[in-house]
Amino acid sequence: MSFILKNITNDAGEKKSINNLNATINSDRLILLAGDKTSGKQMLLKIIGGMLPPDKGTIHYNNLNLYPYNLEEMRAARSRISFVFQNGGLLANLTIHENLRLPLDFLKPELTDTGKEKIISNYMDKFQLFNILEKRPSELTLDVIKQVGFVRALSTGPEVLVMNEPVSDCEVTGVRNIINEITALKKEKKGIIMINQTSNEFLNMADQILIMKQGMIVDSGTYSELRTNYNFAGNNTETTGDYV
């Protein structure tokens, strides 16, 4: 299983552009995107996660176009890939329960209401998030919001999780809940593609680290293979004095 990127181009200013990127990214392992703020890693993560259509080029996941022109193709692609937002990505005008039901109603219409509610209940119990379903995001801490956002991404049973800073701003229990679940997903050979600058634990967990610079993938390998050439302080990568 893999993502196939062909001639991907996105322009967000001179230092944040991706220009004619071609790559094959395996989707059955834990992959960490590394680089500084101008590397294009945030843009690439959003493109892979189905959040940002490229200006030019195509991206396919297992022969599915991630940016199709009809609803059915979009549902087919989105049902296989979930995105975890850095700030949780919850809709402020909805309750936690309504936020959790949205992807299930859109992507899993074949499930009964009872089935959907069981999925929500099981995950909320697993993360020990009790008595918050009728609250709105403004009533919760960022730590809880991020855990709920993570639960929402898991609830549809995706093949791949694309995550932007999944444990930043989380308290100890939240960090451990999320890392434990990511560890379990990795053992199940689920795909995980992520950006992380807060937990060095992911450096050792990663099956592959992709080093990005100026919108291009310039190097790749495991942490043990790359750490002699790059300084991963804060998971920004530095070599010979320059961030890449």
Image (cartoon, rainbow, N blue to C red):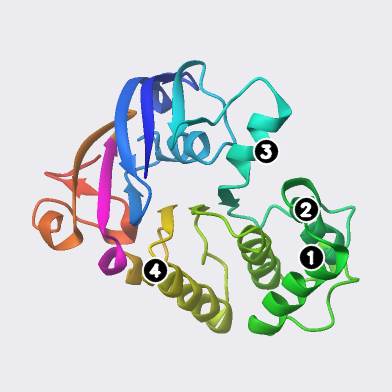
Q: Residue at x 42, y 55 (%)?
A: 191
User: What range of the chain is rendered magenta?
Assistant: 203-212
Q: Earlier in the sequence, mark 4 or mark 3?
A: 3
The amino acid marked with disc number 4 is: Ser
Q: Residue at x 67, y 38 (%)?
A: 75
* Residue linked to disc 3: 75
Structural distance between the alpha carbons of marks 4 and 3: 33 Å
Of labels 1 and 4, the one closer to you:
1
Q: Position of residue 146 (x, y in %)?
A: 64, 65
Decide if residue 113 is on the left or right side of residue 48.
right
Of labels 4 and 3, the one closer to you:
3
Decide if residue 158 is on the left or right side of residue 93.
left
| Label of residue 116 in the image | 1
Structural distance between the alpha carbons of marks 3 and 1: 17 Å
Structural distance between the alpha carbons of marks 1 and 2: 10 Å
Task: Tell whether label 3 touches label 4 (CB within 8 Å).
Answer: no
Choose between 13 and 181: the one closer to the eye.
Answer: 181
Which residue sits furthest top? 56
* Residue linked to disc 2: 110
Q: Position of residue 23 (x, y in %)?
A: 30, 30
How many numbered discs?
Answer: 4
Choose between 55 and 242: the one closer to the eye.
Answer: 55
